[in-house]
């Protein structure tokens, strides 16, 4: 990539950030599109996030992606929220609109598009079990509700965080059957009755290779198991264990790909080259 005085910048703000494949993917897209844009990783502590986001405006960045653990906090720091970000209170994409920072969320769209690549789900007839209550979990919960999921259960260590997602979802989808549970409760029956099982926590991330709190031995060939994190090996303990039980599995690369493509459209107004992006992260 040739960097000049005209090169525009887009960043990804997170902590940790060293594992991210987004710069490889997004820079490959910008090069293929013939755009003089450079996408850079920026490790930012939670205590510095406000300064970092305001700095995007000061340094005239085109925008940024927001990743773990800043998505909810970022929603409180932009100038306005649009679309999914406005209803979820979580931001994964910021667009600098002539000095006004606009928060968007493409995670939900990215998850559904990646899921459609590996499984055909009759959402109206199925139940989903969602583990976690962070920014990505908020987006996935809303995306599943929009697709008409029959029943949704959210499992999280801090019950209040999951209850907050439930309340937000019910404002927009009052007829949805949605439950909140903690890992300490007996969730085996709910697990067995949920075709979709989604880990939306950082368990499984490089340096944190832990299992989410579900009874993996209860998984079967009828389950579709998703883990939104991704590792250099493209595997997590959860996916390996689920596959061992015959379940269909979906890693985090597909969601990364499709949420990133949607972000590029927001920043540039152009359709990005999906195949180029996919090749950059799968090579």
Image (tube, grey):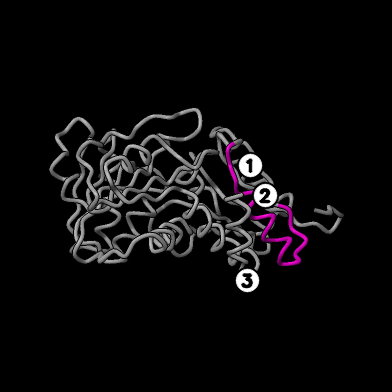
Identified at 71% across, 67% down, the residue is: 33
Residue sticking out furthest to the right: 5
Badge 2 marks a residue whose secondary structure is: helix
- Magenta segment, which residues? 19-38
- Circle 2 crowding by C-alpha within 10 Å: few under 14, some 14–19, many from 20: many
**Of labels 3 and 2, the one closer to you:** 3
Instruction: Judge left or right: residue 16 versus residue 220.
Output: right
Which residue is tagged 2?
56
Identified at 19% across, 39% down, the residue is: 218
Q: Which mark is residue 269?
A: 3
Vertical relation: 159 (above or below) 252: above
Badge 3 marks a residue whose secondary structure is: loop
Q: CA distance from mark 3 to mark 1?
A: 25 Å
Q: CA distance from mark 2 to mark 1?
A: 7 Å
- Circle 1 crowding by C-alpha within 10 Å: few under 14, some 14–19, many from 20: some
Vertical relation: 32 (above or below) 230: below
**Of labels 3 and 1, the one closer to you:** 3
Q: Earlier in the sequence, mark 3 or mark 2?
A: 2
Q: Earlier in the sequence, mark 3 or mark 1?
A: 1
Which residue is tagged 1?
52
- Circle 3 crowding by C-alpha within 10 Å: few under 14, some 14–19, many from 20: few
Residue 17: x and y, percent? 59, 37
- Is 66 or 33 nearer to us in this picture? 33
Residue 4: x and y, percent? 86, 54
Identified at 70% across, 61% down, the residue is: 30
- Is mark 3 in CB contact (under 8 Å) with mark 2? no
């Amino acid at each position: 990539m040739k960097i000049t005085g005209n090169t525009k910048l887009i960043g990804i703000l997170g902590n940790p950030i060293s594992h991210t494949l987004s710069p490889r993917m997004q820079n490959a897209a910008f090069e293929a599109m013939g755009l003089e844009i450079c996408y850079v990783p920026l490790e930012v502590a939670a205590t510095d996030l406000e300064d970092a986001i305001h700095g995007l405006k000061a340094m005239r960045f085109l925008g940024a992606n927001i990743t773990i653990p800043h998505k909810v906090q970022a929603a409180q720091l932009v100038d306005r929220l649009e679309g999914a970000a406005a209803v979820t209170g979580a931001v994964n994409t910021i667009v600098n609109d002539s000095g006004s920072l606009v928060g968007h969320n493409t995670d939900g769209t990215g998850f559904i598009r990646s899921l459609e690549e590996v499984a055909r789900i009759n959402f109206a007839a199925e139940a989903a079990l969602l583990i976690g209550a962070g920014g990505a979990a908020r987006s996935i919960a809303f995306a599943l509700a929009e697709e008409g999921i029959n029943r949704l259960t959210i499992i999280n260590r801090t019950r209040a965080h999951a209850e907050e997602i439930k309340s937000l979802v019910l404002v927009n989808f009052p007829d949805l059957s949605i439950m909140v549970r903690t890992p300490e409760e007996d969730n085996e029956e709910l697990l067995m009755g949920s075709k979709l099982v989604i880990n939306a926590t950082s368990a499984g991330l490089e340096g944190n290779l832990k299992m989410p709190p579900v009874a993996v031995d209860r998984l079967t060939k009828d389950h579709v198991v998703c883990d939104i994190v991704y590792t250099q090996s493209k595997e997590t303990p959860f996916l390996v264990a689920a596959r061992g039980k015959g379940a269909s599995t979906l890693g985090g690369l597909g969601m990364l790909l499709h949420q990133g493509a949607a972000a590029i459209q927001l920043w540039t107004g152009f359709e990005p080259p999906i195949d180029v992006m996919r090749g950059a992260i799968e090579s």
